[in-house]
Amino acid sequence: MAPIAHGTPGGAGPVPRTISGNPRGPQRGRAAASGLSDNLRTQNALYSLSPRAIWGVLKRQPPSFWFVCIYLFFEYVRPQQVYKPIQGLPYARATIILALVSFLLERRTLHFRLFEILLTIFSIILVASSVTAVDSSASYEQLPAFISWVLIYLLIANTVDTEERFLIFMLSFLLYSFKMSQFGTRSWAEEGFAFRDWGTTGAPGWFQNSGEFGIQMCIFLPLIAAFIVALGEYWPRWLRWVAWAVAGTAIISIVASSSRGAFVGLGGVLLWAISTSRKKVRAFAAAVVLAGLVYAITPSEQKTRFQQVGVDATSVSRTTMWKHGLEMMRDYPILGIGYANWTEYHDINYGGHGLLAHNVFIQAGSELGYTGLLAFLAMIATVFVINRRTRLLANRLADRGKFMFYMARGLDGSLVGLIVSGFFISVLYYPFFWINFAMSVALNNSVLNALAADGSLVPGERSTPGRNVRVYH
């Protein structure tokens, strides 16, 4: 992969100095060329997922990045809940605190752009909703949980801020998701691929319920697909086949979860893939084949559940909760009934202790009012805008921007899967939204830093690809 001179929107741009054109002499030019060659070899080795290259990058990273990666491990793998000898300590929270301390000691830059502004607005609404809540004590008790998501977002978005850091962070995210998907596939196979009411679950904690597990698989699938498309050319053929098999375990796990919301989320991901593909006929044909395979392996009991949508007990319960949530929004339109007040308010006014909104948007609107819902929708829209801007910026790096381009597209797909499947379950304060948002902003920061290092980023310049760069689809 040879270095390419990048153009500005006007077609002109900085031209890299060649050996013969170096005003400081051929010796300095040869040294620069040698350094560039070494950088390309290192980059290609990292793209090939060489363990030596990955370790070489890790050794150069500051402690804050290490702690953020360790946090991800404890949050998604949850060994502290699986193995008794290490149970009891707040490992995830401790690593986040260590990451924050390291971040401050390293005097890193904390970016404050559009999404951070929207996150601040959403946070202010949430705190105000807690003050005016029907039961403020319930809100105050859960405030540390929300603050932790804000902190995690800020650390990931501002620490994972180079292409190599993002690649390693994303690789670990995919591996941890695969740990869940292979377990889901294996456990379902051990049951003879039979239907189970409780479905398949993931790691303890956030993913222990089959619905939440299904959402994670809807997030995992487009990200692993984008990762393969972006880097597959650097891998041997056997590794590409293995990677696509890994993606297949996500689809099988969605079926094994027995979650209708996850099925609909998968459908949303497939429609997104068709709509964003340049070769729509081929994408549509592939989606039809995949849908046929999913239908073939889906147990007859699960198919019957889809036929009963709207009349079975689960559907009636959900639609009832949605109706109650809309009534709460009507009665408390500005700041809602209060952050983390749904369960208690519903128990007092409707009966049915422990019931949830079963819809992430109704959860936001009922607890935070229309103001909170609008702020939440604005954050979702902004993530799509950020990912589009990342793709435009990555195009200016030509082949060097291919990985970041496709990962921005994969993050779009994961957000689509999350939004669609989240329409049937209350997961607003789960890691899904906040870590997906953090990765989107982190990727944008990475491409900005890559352009700055390349000398192609001009302060105030619009992120429009130049005429002489390759555009991916």
Image (spheres, helix red, strand yellow):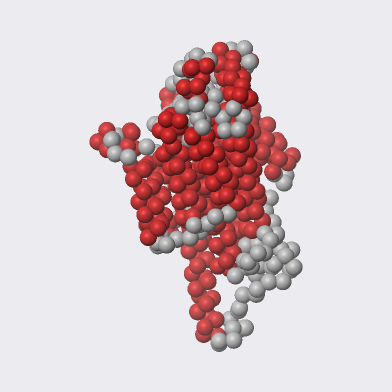
Camera-nearest residue between 242 and 44: 44
Camera-nearest residue between 281 and 171: 171
Camera-nearest residue between 377 and 418: 377
* Residue at 59% in and 17% down: 320
Against 351, is 245 above or below? below
Camera-nearest residue between 56 and 426: 426
- Quadrant in the picture for residue 288: top right
Against 44, is 205 above or below? above
* Residue at 62% in and 75% down: 16
99 horizontally vs 302: left or right: left
> Looking at the picture, how far across and down is residue 28, in whole percent?
52, 83
Residue 106 makes an appearance in the image: yes
* Residue at 52% in and 37% down: 128
> Looking at the picture, how far across and down is residue 9, in whole percent?
72, 65
* Residue at 50% in and 26% down: 134
For the N terminus, which image quadrant?
A: bottom right
> Looking at the picture, how far across and down is residue 30, in whole percent?
53, 80
Point out the residue furthest to the left here.
Answer: 85
